[in-house]
Image (cartoon, grey):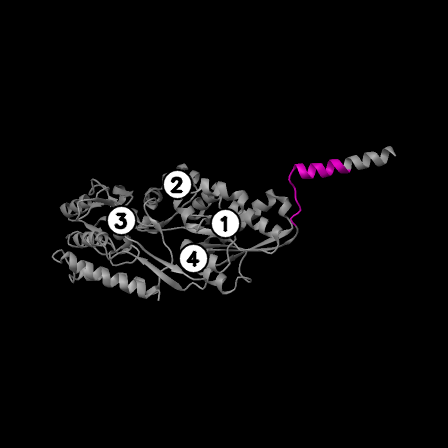
Amino acid sequence: MKKKILVSFLAVLMVLGLVGCGKKNYGTGEIKVWVADNVVEFTDNQIKSFMEANPEYAGYTVTIEPVGEGDAAGQVITDVTAAADIYAFPQDQIARLVSAGALEVVNPDYEADVKKNNDAGSIGAATVGEKLYAYPLTSDNGYFLYYDKSVVTDPSSLEKIVADCEAAGKNFYFEVNSGWYQTAFFFATGCELTYDTDDNGNFTKANVSYASDAGVVALREIIELCASPSFQNGSSAGEATNVGAIVDGTWDSAAVKEIMGDNYACAKLPSFEGSDGKTYQLSGFGGFKLLGVKPQEDENKLAVCDAIANYLASEEVQLARYNEVGWGPSNIKAQGSADVKADEALSALGEQLAFSIPQGQYPGDYWNLATSLGDSVRNGEISASSSDADLMAALQNFQDTCVSYAK
């Protein structure tokens, strides 16, 4: 009898011990992960470390496949069932993915920490309506100012940058006929340009306010910039010459460093004084990489997928990913690390993203339309001598055409 009691007591202790350690049996299964080719090995190593540290998930086999962020959303929407359980994607695809039922909301156990630990831009990009649908991975796609500090004395003012470049006989590059860079002026003055989509990703509504007093102020600033002898239309450092300043992204930091040498410097985009006498901070698009989890019928598998996604988006892994491949963290503490802060380009972009708008989905024709608007300034079709009524007419045509894409 005593022996049976002892055995039973030990069994109870074992059960209590397992419960106390939080060791739940999550079952078995296979989990597929899609990430860009250049981080496949990194992701594989990180997940292996995670699984070793969490033996309760040992019943799951994780496979990493190289599917880039730009391709992942389209493949997921085409066949949600066959798609990866965890996949990285750019923020402009999140509405389509949610509409297609391809994203599970972030696990409530992690939601508060995810919101607290990542910058506001990335959280906004990962949110649809009031719900958080993805784990932020990066805050590193956008544009800011590179400048030669022996030329530019005050990078906070567009007028002073232009004046300094003119005085030094240097070029200032800004791609005003690009639908991506051009928004810097219009969003700065408060104009809106976004699209709503239906469950199939079709554009159903255009939210555009370019044909407005704010739009006229923005367009006049573009006209003024293009009139400067220092102005050059472009955003590729590798193709730029005699550079005093250039609006570009982190991908060109090495090229800019080679051009500017010891005079290399970075800053957020400057402000400008509008034709109405008001000061406006240049804005524009920001881009973020996000990590999504596909809805699962098996709640245990969903819990494991969320745990893996949360880990891959953690401060530790974001910082390791920056050191490995240079991706800029969205995690606030990782952004504050010595290594990341020493990266002048990422620091400048981080400042600029606070004034930027996450890029959503836009019709392909929009980009050609924006090029035409910028070119109408560059070729003198509209100029400083154009009346406000002329500019409003050009903007109304632009706006009406944008609206037509959603009909």
Q: Which mark is residue 93?
A: 4
Sequence-first tag of 1 and 3: 1
The residue identified by callout 2 is: 340
Q: Residues within 10 Å of mark 3 (few under 14, many from 20)?
A: many
Q: CA distance from mark 2 to mark 1?
A: 19 Å
Q: CA distance from mark 4 to mark 2?
A: 27 Å
Q: CA distance from mark 3 to mark 2?
A: 27 Å
Residue type beneath disc 1: Phe
| Left or right of 26 in this view: 228 | left
Residue type beneath disc 3: Ala
Residue type beneath disc 4: Gln
The residue identified by callout 3 is: 188
Q: Which residues are magenta?
A: 11-26
Q: CB atoms at circles 4 and 2 under 8 Å apart?
A: no
Q: Residue furthest left?
A: 385
Closest to the camera, between mark 3 and mark 2, is: 3
Q: Main secondary structure of the magenta part?
A: helix
Sequence-first tag of 4 and 1: 1
Q: Position of residue 79 (x, y in %)?
A: 52, 64
Q: CA distance from mark 4 to mark 1?
A: 24 Å
Q: Residues within 10 Å of mark 1 (few under 14, many from 20)?
A: some
